[in-house]
Image (cartoon, rainbow, N blue to C red):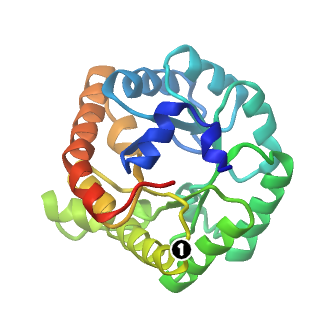
Amino acid sequence: MSRLQNLPYELQQSFSNHSVLKVITGLNNFEQNLVKKVARSASVGGGDLLDIACCPQLVKAAIENSDLPVCVSSVQPEKFPEAIEAGASMIEIGNFDSFYPEGRLFSSEEVLSLTIQTRKLLPDVVLSVTVPHTLAFDQQSQLALDLVEVGADVIQTEGGTSSTPAKSGVMGLIEKASPTLASVYSISQSFEESGCKAPILCASGLSEITVPMALISGASGVGIGSAVNRLDNELEMIAMVKTLRESIFNTESFVKRLVPPIQ
């Protein structure tokens, strides 16, 4: 039985329908007031999943302010069990974008090691693992397959914070998302060729303009961070989440014709 069946039914359906909308506050963001605002906004706006830093207090704050399942993100596996005990439904290794400005890179071997450690600690919890965008595309694809082999349930892509658009407007938004979109396409192609059924979440640098591109490229859903959490107030956050949900809804029927549901 797939561990994805341990998730709340509504989130399972969103994975199956390739329509997951995950709202992210950030792996290194421990600001409780922001987490509360984003949690409320994601819930009201139509999100499916809230992704926050791995901290029991933040998990409790998120649950108190939202009816959405919570995913906690970290690169320290030993921190996950406490967050699960606090009520988190899902765990994630990555994403790694916040580490790159410090010169901290993650190799395939390190990500695999973190995944194996995490799976030993929590054998039954749904685990998402980010593939570092600093790897070449063929290495990303191979790592994604290897991660599923050692216990990852969901693969996530990244790259937006390292992208420097040369244009403004729509062109700039597409340029911003290009690294994570390219990763999704490459990994989804390798999954199709190998028969791997693990869902892929496309995250980092996305906007309402590029969400449809992510889904058409093979993603089962998207992770949205700064497009929501950088906004000034909850009304703006709610409006953005609703816009993103509408973008997914408008793309969903088309994607269903291209990609069969996950079993």
Q: Residue at x 27, y 21 (%)?
A: 235
**Do we see residue 24 in this rendering?**
no
The answer to whether residue 104 is left or right of residue 187 is: right
Q: Mark 1, residues whose alpha carbon is within 10 Å: few (<14), some, or many (≥20)? A: few
Which image quadrant is residue 55 in?
top right
The reply to whether residue 74 is in sight is yes
Residue 155 appears in which quarter of the rendering? bottom right
Helix, strand or loop at disc 1?
A: loop
- Please report the residue visible at 36 percent of the width from the left and 46 percent of the height from the top: 19
User: Left of 91 or right of it: where is 257?
Assistant: left
Find disc 1 in the rendering and name its residue: 195
The residue at the point 56 percent across, 23 percent down is 62
- Taking 133 as reference, is 115 above or below it? above
Residue 50 sits above or below residue 149 on the image: above
Q: Amino acid at mark 1?
A: Gly
Which residue is at the front of the view, 246 or 102? 246
Provide residue 115's location: percent of width, then percent of height.
74, 60
Residue at figure coordinates x 19%, y 46% from the top left: 250
Please tell me in which quadrant of the rendered image residue 196 appears.
bottom right
Q: Position of residue 158 (x, y in %)?
A: 47, 62
Image spot of residue 207 (x, y percent) = 27, 50
| Left or right relative to 133: residue 240 | left
- Tag count: 1
